[in-house]
Amino acid sequence: MSLYLIAEIGINHNGSMDIAKQLIDAAADAGFDAVKFQKRTIDKVYTKELLDSPRESPWGKTQREQKMGLEFSREQYTEIDRYCKEKGVAWTASAWDVDSQKFIRDFKVSFNKVASAMLGHKPLLREIASEGKKAFISTGMATLEELDEVVELFRKANCPFELLHCNSTYPMPEENANLRCIPMLRARYGCDVGYSGHESSLLKVCTTAVALGATSLERHITLDRAMYGSDQAASIETHALRNFVETVRMVPSLLGTGER
């Protein structure tokens, strides 16, 4: 089975379609299989009190202005859909609420992504599983008991899934990677297991993950780690993406068959 590579654009586009297209270009040119965004219905994900609270950002002085500044409209996602098709790269977005999942569904994306922060959101999980479309499920914020429930939910819905081992710190210290969870999760659930990385280094953790049997990799990408945004420091800069893809795709052939 070939390694599936997802470039997590997330909110690193900073609300700019031009930046989003540059990131799509870089991911497609480097050989990623897909790019991923994030979608939120701001008034459903956050409380009014939080949205009204102060936060300095390029878009204003409140949390609401900051969060709205990072959201793309339907018209903009229509353009993303068209542009990704032109570039020959798949795309999806991780939804943070049921309305956002229904929004994404309208674009007939080829797979769904469940953010680890959403593993306790059972209505959203049921909505995603009801589509019967392959879902990549990040595991970083769940206990094994919670994961048991998520896996059971998707299996009852007959929805194919792949777990992604991850550690939800941004950026993640390499010594916290705990990559032996990849074979552990594979044995526990009898499914494919990938790795979603938030480390600042380029290759050490991801190549080890593939050597341990990861069937997919997801990494945040950015034009510049110094840009505004909470995820930028845990991202790979676009100039390094081609080297990243070539190296991680080489690992299975380096491992060989074990036959002499």
Image (cartoon, rainbow, N blue to C red):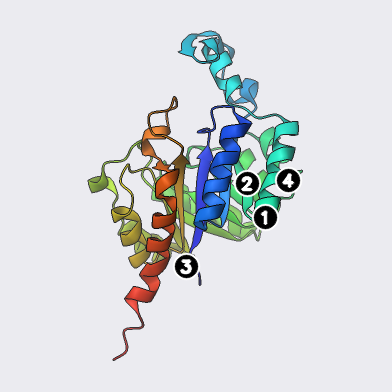
* Disc number placed over residue 82 in the picture, else none: 4
Q: Which mark sits nearer the N-terminus, 3 or 1?
A: 1
Return the residue nearer the eye: 186 or 166: 166
Mark 1–mark 4 distance (CA, rounded to whole Å): 14 Å
Residue at the spot of label 1: 110
Q: Residue 40: horizontal and vertical position, in percent? A: 61, 30
Q: Which residue is mark 2?
A: 92
Q: Secondary structure at mark 4?
A: helix
Give the left or right position of residue 125, taking residue 195 as reference.
right
Residue 41's x, y, as percent?
65, 27
- What crowding class fits label 1: few (fewer than 14 Cα within 10 Å), some (14-19), or many (20 or more)? few
Q: CA distance from mark 4 to mark 3?
A: 36 Å
**Dot 3 and dot 1 residues touching (CB under 8 Å):** no
| Residue 135 image position (x, y, % from top left) | 59, 54
Residue 23 percent location from the top left of the image = 54, 42
Q: Residue at x 45, y 61 (%)?
A: 193
Badge 1 element: loop
Label 2 Cα neighbours within 10 Å, binned few <14 / some 14-19 / many ≥20: many
252 or 243, which lies in front? 243
As shown in the figure, which amino acid type bears the numbered disc 2? Thr
Q: Nearer the viewer, mark 3 or mark 1?
A: 1
N-terminal-most mark, 1 or 2? 2
Q: Are marks 1 and 2 in contact (CB under 8 Å)?
A: yes
- Which residue is disc 3 drawn over? 190
Residue 156, can we see it? Answer: yes
What amino acid is found at the position of numbered circle 4 in the picture? Arg
The residue that appears at 37% across and 38% down in the rendered structure is: 234
Q: CA distance from mark 4 to mark 2?
A: 13 Å
Side of 3 relative to 260 (left or right): right
Label located before the other in sequence (1 or 4): 4
The kind of residue on which mark 1 rests is Ser
N-term mark: 4 or 3 = 4
